[in-house]
Image (cartoon, rainbow, N blue to C red):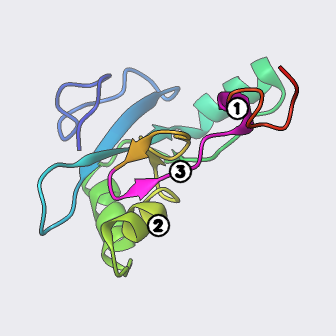
Amino acid sequence: MVSPDVEDLASWVPPDELFSVFVQLLIGPIDGPGEESFGILFCSPMWLANEVAERGIVDGRHTYFVDSWDWRMICDYLNKRIASLEADSWTELAGQLSRIGHWEFEDYVGVRAPNRVFPPPKWWLPKWEAGKSV
């Protein structure tokens, strides 16, 4: 796990009770090269309260709320969640992992993600292919 916000996640101490830190899980197939990123935001209840006060609504998808920054507890939690997953292919497993963290290929359309091709949306197609006149 890595973070663009914090150099050493294991020894990091939040500056106060209002904190958030973005963490990337770098996970790949056991039998193949490469890894893919699954992004998670960890934040304190005070951070959440502050965001709700400022914005009114906060979407908690891929966001985990922790009372304090306890790296061992966070690692144990994520390891158990990930170890419980089962799939027949990397693509299927990545789809399950995307429920834990935001998969870098989660919303891709019209491009090739590893082991998966998504159809392009209609607005990518030439007008005559989308059923519109030129």
| Rendered view: 86 above or below 105 | below
Q: Position of residue 49 (x, y in %)?
A: 70, 32
Q: Tag 3, which secondary structure?
A: loop
Identify the element where label 2 is drawn: helix
Instruction: Single out the mark in the foreground, 2 or 1.
Output: 2
Asked if residue 120 is among those painted magenta in the image, a careful observer would answer yes
What kind of element bears circle 1?
helix
| Above or below for 110 versus 76 | above
Counting from the top left corner in percent of width and height, residue 8 is at 17, 31
Give yes or no for residue 68 being in the magenta stretch: no
Q: Is residue 108 left or right of residue 7?
A: right
The CA span between labels 2 and 3 is: 17 Å
Which numbered marker is on residue 112? none
Q: Which residue is mark 2?
A: 96
Residue at 62% x, 47% y: name it.
61
Q: Residues within 10 Å of mark 3 (few under 14, many from 20)?
A: few
> Label for residue 49?
1
Q: Which residue lies at the image location 73% right of the left edge and 37% below the top edge?
A: 129
Nearest to the eye among marks 3 and 1: give it.
3
Magenta-tinted stretch: 114-125
Cα–Cα gap, marks 2 and 1: 29 Å
Specify which label sits upstream in the sequence, 3 or 1. 1
Q: Position of residue 45 (x, y in %)?
A: 60, 39
Type of amino acid under label 1: Ala
Specify which label sits upstream in the sequence, 2 or 1: 1
103 or 40, which is in the foreground?
Answer: 103
* 127 over 10 or under it: above or below: above
Q: Which mark is on residue 118?
A: 3
